[in-house]
Structure formats: C-alpha cells, structure tokens
Amino acid sequence: MAKQTKKAKALEIKLGENLKQYPVDEAITLLRDLKSAKFDETIEVAMNLGVDPRHADQMVRGMVSLPSGTGKTVRVAVFAKGDKAQEALDAGADKVGAEDLMEDMQAGNLDYDRVIATPDMMGVVGRLGKVLGPKGLMPNPKLGTVTPNVSQAVKDAKGGQIEFRVEKQGIIHAGIGKMSFSDTDLKTNFDAFVDAIVKAKPAGAKGKYVRKITLSSSMGPGLKIDTTEVAGA
C-alpha cells in the first residue's frame, strides 16, 4: 500500500473520514479552507439519483441557467443565414455559418461548448450527427438549441446556462462556479442547479429520487451534503 502523505492524513483527520453530511454553506467554507491548488479551482456538484437512464421514462436531461454564471468562457457556434446570422453575431457568437461551418466541423474544428441552429438549418446540421453527437453538441429543440431566437440562445449560453444529463449509473454532475466566486454566488448557483434537477424528476423514477449530493473542488475532497436541505428531494 502506498504511503499516505502528510496532507492526505491531515485531510482524513479534518474530515473525520468524510462520514459527516454538511450544510451547503459549511461545505463551501471547508473547501476554501482545504484549497491547495494555485489555479482557480472549479466547484462541482454531483448528484446520485434514483433513476435508471436505460429506460426512456427515467431519463433526466435539460438546461439550467446559473444566476451567477459559470466563470468559464463559453465558445458558441451557430448555424444560421441572413438576418439570423447577424443576430447571432451581434449576441456574441464565436462562429456563425451554414454549409461552410459544417465543412469546418467535418474537418475537425470542434472547439465549441455549445452549438445552436435555426430550424431551417437542421438539414445541414443533420449531416454532422456522427461528429457532434458523441461530443454532446448536437442541437436539440428540447434543449432550446434549435430555435429561431438565436440571439437569446447565444446570450443564455454565454451568460451561465449549462446542460445536464444523467449518466448510466444514475449520476448527474456539473461545475457551478469557481473558487474565486463569493459564498453567496456559489450557494445561489448550487440552489439553482439542484432545483432544476428536482423539477426534472421523470415520471418513471421510483423510491427516493435524490439519494446523495456531493460538493467538491477540482483538487479537493468530495463533501457529502445534507439532502434534508433540498426541497422535493
């Protein structure tokens, strides 16, 4: 067995082997106290849900806008023509195009966090299914990324809107801000994210829906959150 470092021992002692469940405010404070990285770490939340996403009626997926933003620069590509293309550019889209953008993506230029399209462009976008699909970038009307209102979609993406989707093991996770955010901003984002997941509870979910919530930082430990604080859990 590898020898435990002094830092690891200190963490284990301080966290009481991580058996405790923390109020969100206390968990945020403790993560700051344990910060060791020199970069601005991301604060992440993970939720274990009582769902089996292999069944269509137990899939949890959607969008949520984090009120305090993500602290991340979001690159957005938009498939649009004419006035809609100009609207997307005016709203701050990083790349706007049609067939030319499709060819660019087919060539491997996929450095984007969100891809948006107007409905009339889906014939073009559809040819990118094998390219965008595996990266989770395929525009989807249910997620608001296929829309005639490209200006608002771009602003939402740039302003802190994130996508969530449950994984095979029933786990859903996301970054909700940076260590440099204030406690209030992190708590506001945490509440918005968890509330969105609770409201997205699928009809097929059985038993306890929110089974566990963990808050962590990029280089820090995972702290279990007291789920009794979460309404509807």
Image: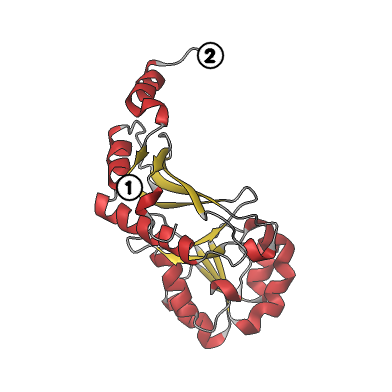
Residue 3, horizontal then vertical, whole percent: 49, 12
Q: Which mark is residue 118?
A: none
As rendered, which of 146 and 151 lies closer to the eye?
146
Residue 13, horizontal then vertical, whole percent: 35, 22
Kind of residue at disc 2: Ala
Q: Which residue is mark 1?
A: 24
> Residue placed at 59% from the left, 76% from the top?
141
Task: Name the residue at the front extreme.
Answer: 207
Residue 210, horizontal then vertical, whole percent: 49, 53
Q: Which residue is mark 2?
A: 2
Looking at the rendered image, the quarter that the C terminus falls into is bottom left
> Residue placed at 55% from the left, 86% from the top?
82
69 left or right, relative to 207: left
> Residue placed at 63% from the left, 70% from the top?
101
Q: Give the image quarter of residue 122.
A: bottom right
Judge whether residue 227 can be spotted in this image.
yes
> Residue placed at 37% from the left, 51% from the top?
228
Judge whether residue 107 can be spotted in this image.
no
Q: Are marks 1 and 2 in contact (CB under 8 Å)?
A: no
User: Label 1, label 2: how many angstroms apart (C-alpha)?
Assistant: 33 Å
Indicate which disc, 1 or 2, sits on the residue closer to the N terminus.
2
Kind of residue at disc 1: Val
